[in-house]
């Protein structure tokens, strides 16, 4: 899937906290300070791990796909490690002299969501960098809030369960950078639907979401696209322009967005039709 370069989509933008955000690094071991600090970078500035955003995005898209057909977003954990490892090992042995056939077999055993986001046996096509804070939107301060554990029997505060926690203030912006390589059109359409959920404040991040924390909004600045189409000369031109910093190395992908979503819908309709045909035949 990655042995030959085919296409690349680069997405940049800003992620803004609409409400306070809390992504915890666990309980603090410091003698003085908040009980539950947020994740910070080496300079003590707030940080959103790329894995947190990617995980939230994947979870939302999985729920959509399962609503259409459960087989489109299966849980890799349901395929036990021992059984999975044996199956993959057997596949590698059967197709040890043909990498293309092995790749095809691995793709066949992979649900739709994992073809884009990856699984234990197939690499992810979608990468998200850690989101660093935009300096002008953060003024070096965190908010601290109090929390308390509730006794379920008495419905009152449990003894000794008072704690405090840090949050990143609302209005803080983070740099968003993501890359997709060698994706099919329908996979790009799936990704566009997921990013739209972040653009419309539909996917919260971090903990405390039941308290209203973690509402974020994504504003995409650029979507830069290049597709080689098995054209060696075009690839050489792209590499030259890339090194020279020539922006014409990429196309603006905004005009492809609707078509990718259409391709995704068409692909799912085709998969459903094939599945119904198979079920009827059996």
Image (spheres, helix red, strand yellow):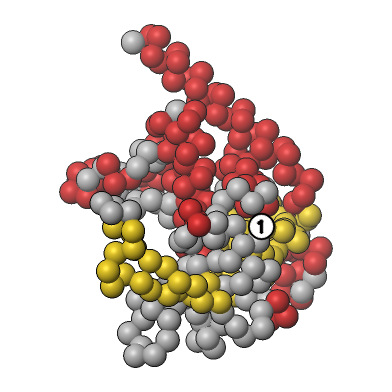
Whether residue 23 is situated above or below residue 183 in the rendered picture: below
- Visible in this render: residue 126? no
Q: Residue furthest top?
A: 281
Residue at the image point whose x is 51% and y is 76% from the top: 144
Residue 12 or residue 169, whichever sits in front: 169
| Residue tagged 1 | 217
Q: Where residue 30 appears, x then y in whole percent?
A: 36, 88
- Left or right: residue 76 versus residue 219 is left
Q: Where residue 217 appears, x then y in whole percent?
A: 66, 57
The answer to which image quadrant residue 90 occupies is: top left
Q: How many marks?
A: 1
The answer to which image quadrant residue 158 occupies is: bottom left
- Left or right: residue 49 versus residue 94 is right
Residue 220 or residue 38, whichever sits in front: 38
Q: Where residue 111 appears, x then y in whole percent?
A: 41, 39
Whether residue 154 is situated above or below residue 256 in the rendered picture: below
The answer to which image quadrant residue 168 occupies is: bottom right
Whether residue 139 is situated above or below residue 280 in the rendered picture: below
Residue at the image point whose x is 72% and y is 70% from the top: 242
- Left or right: residue 58 versus residue 229 is left
């Amino acid at each position: 899937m990655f042995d030959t370069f085919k296409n690349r989509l680069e997405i940049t933008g800003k992620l803004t906290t609409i409400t306070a955000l809390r992504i915890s690094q666990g309980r603090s071991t410091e003698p003085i300070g908040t009980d539950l600090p947020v994740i910070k970078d080496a300079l003590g500035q707030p940080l959103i791990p790329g894995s947190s955003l990617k995980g939230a995005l994947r979870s939302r898209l999985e729920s959509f796909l399962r609503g259409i057909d459960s087989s489109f977003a299966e849980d890799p954990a349901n395929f036990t490690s021992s059984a999975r490892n044996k199956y993959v090992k057997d596949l590698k042995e059967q197709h040890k002299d043909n990498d293309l056939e092995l790749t095809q077999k691995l793709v066949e055993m992979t649900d739709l969501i994992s073809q884009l986001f990856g699984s234990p046996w197939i690499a992810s096509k979608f990468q998200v960098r850690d989101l660093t804070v935009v300096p002008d939107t953060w003024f070096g301060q965190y908010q601290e809030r109090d929390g308390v554990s509730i006794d379920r029997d008495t419905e009152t505060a449990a003894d000794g369960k008072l704690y405090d926690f840090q949050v990143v203030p609302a209005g803080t912006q983070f740099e968003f950078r993501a890359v997709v390589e060698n994706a099919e059109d329908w996979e790009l359409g799936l990704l566009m639907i997921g990013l739209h959920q972040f653009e419309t404040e539909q996917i919260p991040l971090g903990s405390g979401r039941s308290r209203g924390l973690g509402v974020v909004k994504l504003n995409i600045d650029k979507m830069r696209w290049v597709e080689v189409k098995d054209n060696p000369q075009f690839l050489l031109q792209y590499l030259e322009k890339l090194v020279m910093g020539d922006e014409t190395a990429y196309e603006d992908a905004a005009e492809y967005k609707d078509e990718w979503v259409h391709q995704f819908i068409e692909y799912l309709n085709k998969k459903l039709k094939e599945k119904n045909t198979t079920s009827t035949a059996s």
